[in-house]
Amino acid sequence: MENHFTLEQQKESLHKITSDLIKPIGINRSFHLWMGFLTLALLGCLYAYYLQLRDGLGVAGIRDYVSWGMYIANFVFFVASSLIGMLITAVLGLSGAKWISPIARISEIIAIGFAAIAGLVIVSDMGRPERLINVFIYGRIQSPILWDVTVVTTYVLISLILLYLPLIPDLAMLSRNQTLPKWLRKAYELLSINWKGTASQYEILHKAIKIMAILIIPVALAIHTVTSWLFASTARVGWDSTIFGPYFVTGAFVAGTGFLIIAMYFFRKNYKLHDYITELHFDKIGKILVLVSLVYLYFNINEFLVPGYKMKSHEAVHLRELMAGNHAWLFWGVQIFGLILPIVLLLFKKMRKPLPMFIISIFIVIGSWFKRYLIVVPTQEHPFLPIQNVPDNFIYYQPTLIEGLITMASFILVLMIVTILSKVFPIIPIWETAHEKGIHEPEKLS
């Protein structure tokens, strides 16, 4: 039912909404300490990358047989996590789910952070990163690698547009807010592109958002489908699968939703947004997580049951190694603690509260990363050709400290992007929140 308030009530309500949602904006002591810590940690990780550039990829655990290790597993994980923007903004947004309004911008920030750094993760796996330009100069349309570069870049651009468009009304209002620093108000005024809040402008804005939301769906599906084809287009046991496309996409929704819940909990608690990111939002996103996890569990069963039933010789070796060999403890840990147990727990409403969901999501995210590790590494330890007269470290992959630090650098960069965006822009849309409260022309009242 639509709310009707007097002009004074609307002004008072808008003032409270604006004050609450811009409170986290700004550079303060906590921001300096956090960014200083991240910068110092990043410098240590960059030194590890310098050692890799100087001494070669031999300092990492990757060798002749296992030529893809943590770096590629991390790349797949980053691409997967970035799909949360499409799931929330596009799929749920186009379906008319109004409850996503407070979390849509958070999902886009996460998507931009992970998608933007995914390309750098690939560079970390290159022994000669200066040759990356050759992908663009000599790239062939037949190569899935060129497809991957193209769709990742396109996805980042569309995600930036989807973040920016709903920001425009907020930027116009905040450009007149005297409590904000002058330089920030000037930046807001420039970015608001002369927004006045007229009916025609809102009509154009809604159409533009809808168009970009529609466009991002095939691009997002392509980004992880193409990533899966980098594996599935080979004849290797463990990768030679026709369901890798949807298998990767559903797994991406699980990982991305886990990250979104962690971010929701952090922003709600630390930015004092309990009135805006409520238990209702956790309950609904928890149900979404159960749904995508069940679909992902279905694909997991298919991925192992079918080759297990046929039990071809090479597939038998690979499956035994996963389920009862060196990787068994990791395989069963991922399946039980990263997928099955979270599904069971989230079926109960009391577990779809903020704190339980935060803890469960941590397990889901960790399990999702190790799931990518299990997709990438064990397959390479069982090539078709026999392995003879080589050291054990050429056969069995063991991550190194340098490799771990370089991998950690990518997460630090994502945290930096998310931190900066959340301190410069309101993470919850002010104008949409005002409209939901019955304030239909917030620009004229601000």
Image (cartoon, rainbow, N blue to C red):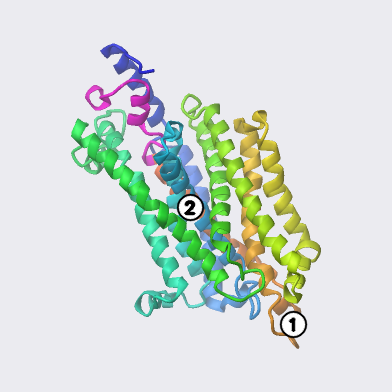
Q: Is residue 298 above or below residue 378?
A: above
Is 331 within the magenta? Answer: no
Mark 2: which secondary structure? loop
Is 84 on the left or on the right of 153, as rendered?
Answer: right
Work out whether residue 194 can be spotted: yes
CA separation, marks 1 and 2?
38 Å
The mark nearer the N terminus, 1 or 2, is: 2
Number of marks in the rendered image:
2
Q: Position of residue 338 (x, y in %)?
A: 68, 49
Q: Residue at x 18, y 39 (%)?
A: 194
- Compare residues 9 and 174 and report the one nearer the observer: 9
Is residue 388 shown above or below 45? Answer: below
Q: Position of residue 385 (x, y in %)?
A: 69, 84
What residue is disc 2 on? 82
Q: Amino acid at mark 2?
A: Ser
- Number of the label disc, if any, that sits on residue 150: none
The extreme right residue here reads: 324
* Residue appearing at x 62%, y 36% in the figure: 357
- Horizontally, is 273 left or right of 385 in the view? left
Disc 1, SS:
loop
Query: What crowding class fits label 1: few (fewer than 14 Cα within 10 Å), some (14-19), or many (20 or more)?
Result: few
Residue plotted at (45% across, 47% down): 85
Q: Which residues are magenta?
A: 424-446
Residue 137 x, y percent position in the rendering:
35, 78
Near-viewer residue (321 or 362): 321
In the image, what residue occupies the spot 45% across and 40% down?
A: 92
Dot 2: few (<14), some (14–19), or many (≥20) neighbours within 10 Å?
A: many
Give the residue pinned by disc 1: 391
